[in-house]
Image: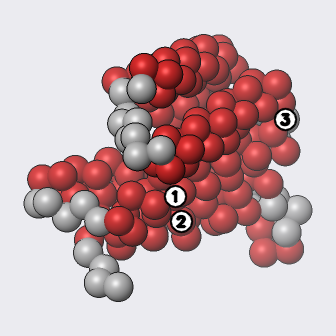
Amino acid sequence: MRMNLPNILAFSRLAMAPLLLWLLAGRDSSLLQGIHESWLDYFAALVFVLASVTDFFDGYIARMFNQITALGKIIDPLADKMLTLAAFLGLVVLQRADVWAIFLILSREFFITGLRVVAVGEGKEISSSMAGKVKTVSQMFAIGFLTMNWPGGETLLWIAVAITLYSGYEYIREYAKG
């Protein structure tokens, strides 16, 4: 297996996901004792922003320099899902995110991932839509606001839920077309 820069960036995102979860949900850890909550929010936000930047660049570099690989097609979406899962679980633990909103988002993610696997088994490929890209950005904004405990985070989360469910509908519609 030959590694290229996009895959290295995706693997770095995989590594940042548990760090993000620890910074959000592991605040009772002895290693984090004595660090003020606001600093833990800053560190968690920094990790999330760095991981989000790697998400942008791994896709950009892969497309621009024709470095799309089979490994990248697996690792990139896995890293995305692990990062958002870590963020949302941590935010639920901190009681900053509504558990029902997170349930809806994660249920959609699992369902669409399963649908894509079925589609590949049938020789179909369901590509990302613009709604899927908007979904990702809306979730990133919601996670950022909730991580920093800024006003409006809960509203952004519910907007992200609506966009997430709509983009899921688009995937189902594209699959059904054949």
- Helix, strand or loop at label 3? It is loop
Q: Is residue 56 visible?
A: yes
Location of mark 3 (residue): 95
The quadrant the N terminus occupies is bottom left
From the viewer's perspective, is residue 33 above or below residue 102?
below
From the viewer's perspective, is residue 123 above or below residue 70?
above
Identified at 60% across, 14% down, the residue is 162
Identified at 54% across, 48% down, the residue is 117
* Color encoding of the figure: secondary structure
- Helix, strand or loop at label 1? It is helix
From the viewer's perspective, is residue 29 above or below residue 47?
below
In the image, what residue type sits under mark 1? Ala
Q: Earlier in the sequence, mark 1 or mark 2?
A: 2
Location of mark 2 (residue): 14
Identified at 19% across, 64% down, the residue is 67
Of 176 and 23, which appears nearest the observer? 176
Measured in 3D between alpha carbons, the distance from the residue under mark 3 to the one under mark 2, in whole angstroms, is 24 Å
Q: Earlier in the sequence, mark 3 or mark 1?
A: 1
From the viewer's perspective, is residue 159 above or below residue 133?
above
Q: Residues within 10 Å of mark 2 (few under 14, many from 20)?
A: many
In the image, what residue type sits under mark 2? Leu
The quadrant the C terminus occupies is top left
Residue lying at the far bottom in this picture: please name it. Answer: 1
Left or right position of 166 against 55: right
Q: Residues within 10 Å of mark 3 (few under 14, many from 20)?
A: few
Of 54 and 164, which appears nearest the observer? 164
Location of mark 1 (residue): 79
Q: Position of residue 176 (x, y in %)?
A: 50, 22
Comparing labels 3 and 2, the label whose residue is closer to the camera: 2
Identified at 67% across, 48% down, the residue is 85
